[in-house]
Amino acid sequence: MNIILLGAPGAGKGTLASKIVDEYKLPHISTGDIFRENIKNQTPIGVVAKSYIDKGQLVPDEVTCQIVEERLTREDCKNGYMLDGFPRTNAQAEALDKITNVELVINIDVDFSLLMGRLCGRRVCKDCGESYHITRLNGATTCSRCGGELYQRKDDNPETVQSRLDVYNAQTAPLIEYYTKQGKIFNVNGSTTPEDVFEKVAEKLNALRK
Ligand code: AMP
């Protein structure tokens, strides 16, 4: 299965991704995670990416497409993959269409008024990447999945979040139409619970797998 997760920042792509990975054993390719790893290791890509990510802007298509193209050639993608946070522009979607056959685009649709609160209250596990919200943590500072330390992403502050949401509206939302025209969009309501979202998506994926 070749799958894309589409949705605004805070829509729940990462949370859904971790459930899909557990159930369907697909490699999880998150361009945001790849950039954060590069920033941590202070690689040349990391240095470039940081200057954009800190401002809530998109890393240039050239850099991003190259990373994904390389990643998709690896052995573990032979039987499918799940892209999370890529593509985010028309140019990225067109580049992807040239190298692979996307089967399904899961679009997580969320009421925009929820996103600022979700992102600014988000805490992420340093080790496994699991996301939490402070309102559900009851003061816990470690991950209930793996015990890793929780942290707040530097770009999860009100100013940068606003910029990320504006960028989503201008550059990424048009991809819904792009993939609708290709007949590949599956819309799911992301304003409900993570369990509910996964249940709806699993029905679709099980049908696709048959
Ligand atoms: P995410 O973890 O998906 O929220 O991504 C964090 C940040 O990484 C984004 O705000 C962008 O600055 C950058 N980024 C991630 N994926 C892409 C992409 N496909 N194209 C350009 N920039 C990206």
Image: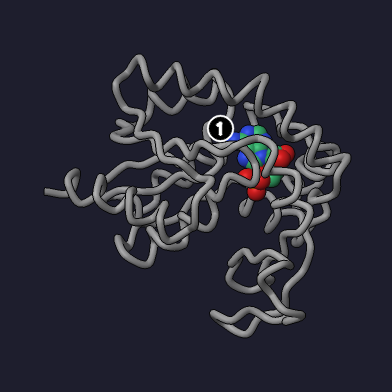
Seen in the picture, residue 2 relative to 143 is either above or below; the reply is above
Indicate the colouring scheme.
one colour
Q: Residue at x 20, y 51 (%)?
A: 206
* Quarter placement of the N terminus: top left
Identified by mark 1, the residue type is Cys
| Residue receiving disc 1 | 65
19 with respect to 115 (left or right): left
Mark 1 C-beta closer than 8 Å to ligand 1: no
Seen in the picture, residue 200 relative to 100 is either above or below; the reply is below
24 with respect to 52 (left or right): left
- Residue 109: horizontal and vertical position, in percent? 51, 36
- Residue 19: horizontal and vertical position, in percent? 42, 62
Q: Residue at x 32, y 65 (%)?
A: 23
Q: What crowding class fits label 1: few (fewer than 14 Cα within 10 Å), some (14-19), or many (20 or more)? A: many
Q: Residue at x 65, y 42 (%)?
A: 9
Q: Please tell me which residue lies in front, 58 or 199.
A: 199
Give the image quarter of residue 67: top right
99 with respect to 163 (left or right): left
56 with respect to 106 (left or right): right
Q: Please tell me which residue lies in front, 87 or 208.
A: 208
Seen in the picture, residue 107 relative to 74 is either above or below; the reply is above
Q: Secondary structure at mark 1?
A: helix
- Residue 12: horizontal and vertical position, in percent? 55, 50
Give the image quarter of residue 169: top right
| Ligand 1: image quarter | top right
- Residue 154: horizontal and vertical position, in percent? 83, 54
